[in-house]
Amino acid sequence: MGTLGGLVILCTGLWIATPHFVTASNLVNVVQQSTIIGVIAVGMTFVILTGGIDLSVGSIVALAGITFGTLVQANVPLPLAAAGALIAGTLCGAVNGALVTIGRLPPFIATLGMMSVARGIALMLSDGRPISGFPAGFRSLATGTVAGIPAPVIIMLALYGAAHFVLTRVRLGRYTYAIGGNEEATALSGVNVRAYKTIVYCISGFVSALTSLLLVARLNSAQPIAGISYELDAIAAVVIGGTSLLGGSGSVVGTLIGALIMSVLRNGLNLLGVSSYVQQVAIGTVIVVAVLVDMALRQRASLPTG
Amino acid sequence: MTTTNGDTAAKTAILRMEGIRKEFPGVVALDGVDLDVRRGEVHVLLGENGAGKSTLMKILSGAYTKDAGRVWIDGMETDISGPRMARELGVGIIYQELTLIPELSAAENVYLGREPRRLRTVVDRSRMIADTRRILNDLGADVPPAAPTRTLSLAQRQLVEIAKALSLEPRILVMDEPTSALTTRETQSLFAAIRRLTARGVAIIYISHRLDEIFEIGDRVTVLRDGRHVSTHTVRSADRRELVRLMANRELDEGISGGTTVRGSELLRVENLTRQGALENVSFSVHAGEIVGIAGLLGAGRTELARVIFGADNADGGRIFVRGKLQNIKSPRDAVRLGIGFLTEDRKAQGLVLGRSVRDNIALPVLRRLSRLGVVRRSEEVALAESYVRDLRIRTPSTSQLALHLSGGNQQKVVLAKWLGCKADILFLDEPTRGIDVGAKQEIYALINKLAASGVGIVMISSELPEVVGLSDRVLVMRGGKIVGEFNRAEATQERLLACAVGA
Ligand SMILES: Nc1ncnc2c1ncn2[C@@H]1O[C@H](COP(=O)(O)OP(=O)(O)OP(=O)(O)O)[C@@H](O)[C@H]1O
Ligand SMILES: [Mg+2]
């Protein structure tokens, strides 16, 4: 797999370039920093596999976070407040799904609209101010460890395990690939394409809300301006991971590696003292090069047919 | 040297391919194949599904690069590096799988990349459309040149592909199963066009699994088997049985016969089904164990009828009864739940998910049955796919091969497997044997008969009249969106069906 090779080369390079990269604490740090985008990118992978796109994930992170904060402030018990946030995120996804399937809008447009609407609602609910101060019990979601591994990392890995199982073994996963590969043939096989596409957007909304909980726990604050440009990072992770934007091919394993590459790159450039302006150039370049290499490898493996 | 019309001077070699080899991962598609083609001849390539015909032609057209071998055109050795170079050398090709861009019109597709221009700038649309219309008319094709090709039927799109190849005025023209979607009428117009071309010295390489056509239009025939050259004959001196034996490497009986029919209870009844511009008051019924054939010309409404019953298109009027109960079928999903299956004619656009494996494709309509609590049971899925790969002799290194990498006929077998395996009670088959070789057709006919014998009601749409006549218990003939004739097994002959279809 080309992406894994890329990650290995990147890590080896940094190992040689700086003594600060391969240390236990830095490596844990790198993985922990990948969790936010990593979790969102799971949902994004599903959406992109069907041939769609979800631009609203960053705004859903903000809206779900504010929903959670508002509920906690109103003395709603934590588990219920968390459930409320997850439901809010899933509902946003359901609306996206309905706009795409029933409204027949291009996913780009539907989720672009949601991007603005969800952000707006988050700002309205919070009056534009962050909500701070959460119980320590909740914050352990970000700060806790199990056997030395940070809780967010465990949550992310569990999510990837589940998503991988769903995509390879569960009917929903098979339909996800089939819809992205040939929607018409899938519909003519008797598959309820509309329902499954909607489910996929719901998954994306749900994991965005899950991300918001991780983020609130980490920052001890729910912010209406959280999650800005997360959609681009998530799409980048998916694409670097070898999933085709046309839909129908790719995997969450690739996405996980893609998210790690982004995180390692940021971390490495920081360690090397590269300015944040140059970092943007480097990250953009890596995205383009990764996709070029991936396409070239694919081309060799499967020749065009007439 | 044997020639068919004595014009020896014109019949010099225009193309020679020698020792061509091509390997794909896990498959040797071509293993030292020779081919020589003369000016003004129709050279037929014959071989079973997966024999390597399309691969050899894709090497000639520059779509694939060969692993070994040499190619001469007009006596000059050439190394065809890509499609562009092939075109410059005068090689034209009509690919087996259509390559039109769906959003563009017929005219825009035909002139893609070389649009006629006014003053070298603005595309001269009216000329483009007029020229396209002229070429299509020469083909006797009823195709609107300005409509997006996605709105055209498979046969119409095939005709546009042919027009596109003709408009390039090639000296060597490859036709890879050009008639597999066409009815007799368009086939005859195509043959007339071929004769005009060969009279001008153009060499045609013609691939088809319809043997009658080979005897009608072919001058010489080269038989391929398992990626090897078997023999080359003049068509006149060739014996049909012998050709079939050479390509299959075994004796085959070409006769088609229906099974014995025990007609059971009524499964499907359609009353006055109407769809604006496509169907008009269509009524018929299908009983358990029965094979109902539907014949008709291009545009008669056969595919449309199946699509409307299956819920892929909406009806404007009429009623559908399944097992005696009135049903409102709004989507293919409703149809599948009622036990209706529909094998579509266009395997690339509507039948297959090309980027997924053979196994995934076969299992797609039955995943619900193959799974427990949403988890697909892999062993059952593998068993299903493997049983069909064996029964239909699908040529593939394994069931995890991508559908994309199979030959055209083998892809068709995958689509067949998909619907044979879905255990539908009512099965619509639209051109089920499109692109399937002579031997495999027999096996498919046997499977269709077996299904009918087990109580499935089958509706078979086919442009191959021998197939309709041979298999059907009853044949309905459609013309202009209406059923214009019904024939029982004893009455149905090719001549009668054709006369009824054209309205004579
Ligand atoms: N792109 C590819 N990748 C892998 N295998 C391929 C590819 N294209 C063709 N093959 C294999 O090469 C063999 C020859 O295929 P080809 O398409 O030339 O057959 P064909 O004679 O045209 O058959 P048909 O009558 O079914 O069209 C087949 O076994 C096929 O599976
Ligand atoms: Mg072929």
Image (tube, helix red, strand yellow):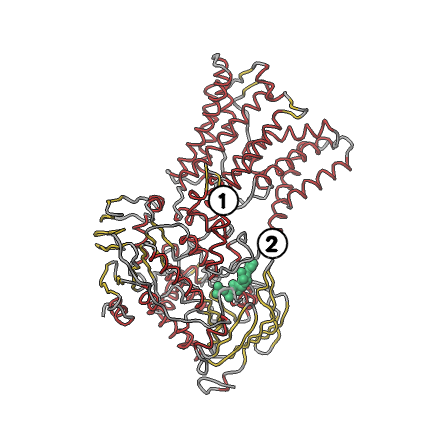
Query: Measuring 21% from the left and 54% from the top, which residue is drawn there?
Result: B281
User: Please, what secondary structure does the residue beneath circle 1 have?
Assistant: helix
- Mark 2 vs ligand 1: CB below 8 Å: no
Q: Are marks 2 and 1 in contact (CB under 8 Å)?
A: no
Q: Position of residue A49 (x, y in %)?
A: 51, 42
Sequence-first tag of 2 and 1: 1
Which residue is nearer to you in this view: B108 or A122? Answer: A122
Q: How many marks?
A: 2
User: Is residue A22 shown above or below B348?
Assistant: above
Q: Position of residue A205 (x, y in %)?
A: 48, 30
Residue designated by label 2:
A301
Whole-Å distance between the Cαs marked 2 and 1?
Answer: 20 Å
Query: Mark 1 is on which residue type?
Result: Tyr
User: Please, what secondary structure does the residue beneath circle 2 have?
Assistant: helix
Q: Is residue A228 left or right of residue B145?
A: right
Query: Measuring 31% from the left and 44% from the top, which residue is drawn there?
Result: B330
Chain to which the residue tagged by mark 2 belongs: A
Q: Quadrant of residue B219?
A: bottom left
- Which numbered circle lies on residue B455? none
- Which numbered circle lies on residue A177? 1
Query: Mark 2 is on which residue type?
Result: Ala
User: Is residue B239 shown above or below A54?
Assistant: below
Q: Is residue B67 left or right of residue B502?
A: right
Q: Position of residue A287 (x, y in %)?
A: 62, 41
